[in-house]
Image (spheres, rainbow, N blue to C red):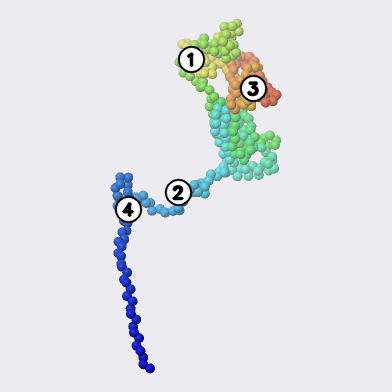
Amino acid sequence: MKKVAKKPKATEIKPKKKLISKRVVRPRRKAAVVASKHEIPLSDMKAEQAKYYTGITGPSEPYYKRSAVAELEHRQIPARYDEDIIVLQIRDPWWAHSYWDVSSGTANRLKNELGDVFDRARWILRSYDVSCLNFDGSNAHRFFDTSVDFDARNWYLNFGSPGTSWCVDLGITLPDGNFITVVRSNTISLPLDGPSWVTDEEWMIPDDEFRRLYGMSVGLGPNVSSPVGKLWQERLKKDISSRGLASMGVSSPVKKIKEKGNFWLVVDAELIIYGATEADARVTVQDKAVKLRKDGTFTLRFALPDGKQVIPVVASSAHIDETRTITPIVARKTTRNP
């Protein structure tokens, strides 16, 4: 057979695609802009930022959170310091605050020495009036006991006598009544609750005005010229030379005035009554109403002439029909040795 040669297929000519060249414009990095619209080169900006770089890297949380955690973990205040201490500090003219701690060694020693008695003992704060004293533990003017909860480790004490000095013993009272001191506090001096008694001599009042005011203070009223008032004035002239006295309660009770060629001495006394009750109670002293402070305390000053004074103090409850009466009886006898 005769082979027939195939004709080559005609090559299809495809149209060429048109190449469209696009110019790609890449945006330039914007320089920092300041308020004045002036551009700052990036190199200068980095240099400016580098001034504040410390080289310290740390957690990503804010610094205040990290410091708070550190305080909680490493700086907690201990509940106690395991030492024998009691501190007394002034709150106002009537109140003081105390706080204390007793070491484990002292507590164990007391338990070993007292045995079962220790568990039946009561913790006591014994408060001593040490005004004008070099206190040695046994020469206080007076003292009173306050039962406390040892674990409370702090207590408020009402001394009720402005202008006095106090210290406190923390100790235990045994069932037989004996008191054992564990630790003693510092000494505090309460401030006065009124004007100072000390004034300059140029502020002293005239003698006649002093006698009138002093007569009112002992209950004679403004009518000092009455027969009783005249009798009192004669007694005052006889007993006390008012030339050496300023107004009681406002200035020093005795002012020394030097006389040429004469040696002299003036002595007088006053009585201070103080107490406390419910803040809303009604209180009378010698049948006269007394205004209480907000905490229910009161303080009164009386002249103390020779003789016997009976001072009934009556407190009546504001809510229930209940009355309490305490009657101080004070006697004064003055002797003179010319």
Q: Earlier in the sequence, mark 2 or mark 3?
A: 2
* Mark in the foreground, 4 or 1: 4
Give the image location of residue 97, x and y in percent. 57, 33
* Mark in the foreground, 1 or 2: 2
Q: CA distance from mark 4 to mark 1?
A: 87 Å
Q: Earlier in the sequence, mark 1 or mark 2?
A: 2
- The residue lying at 66 percent from left, 19 percent from top is 312
Q: Which is more toward the observer, 212 or 319?
A: 319
Which dot marks residue 204?
1
Q: CA distance from mark 4 to mark 2?
A: 32 Å
- The residue lying at 55 percent from left, 31 percent from top is 91
Return the residue at label 2. Answer: 63
* Mark in the foreground, 2 or 3: 2
Decide: few, some or many residues near mark 4? Use Cα within 10 Å; few <14, some 14-19, many ≥20: few
Return the residue at label 4. Answer: 30
Q: Earlier in the sequence, mark 3 or mark 1?
A: 1
Q: Which is more toward the observer, 244 or 289?
A: 289
Q: CA distance from mark 3 to mark 1?
A: 36 Å
User: Element at badge 1?
Assistant: loop
Which dot marks residue 282?
3
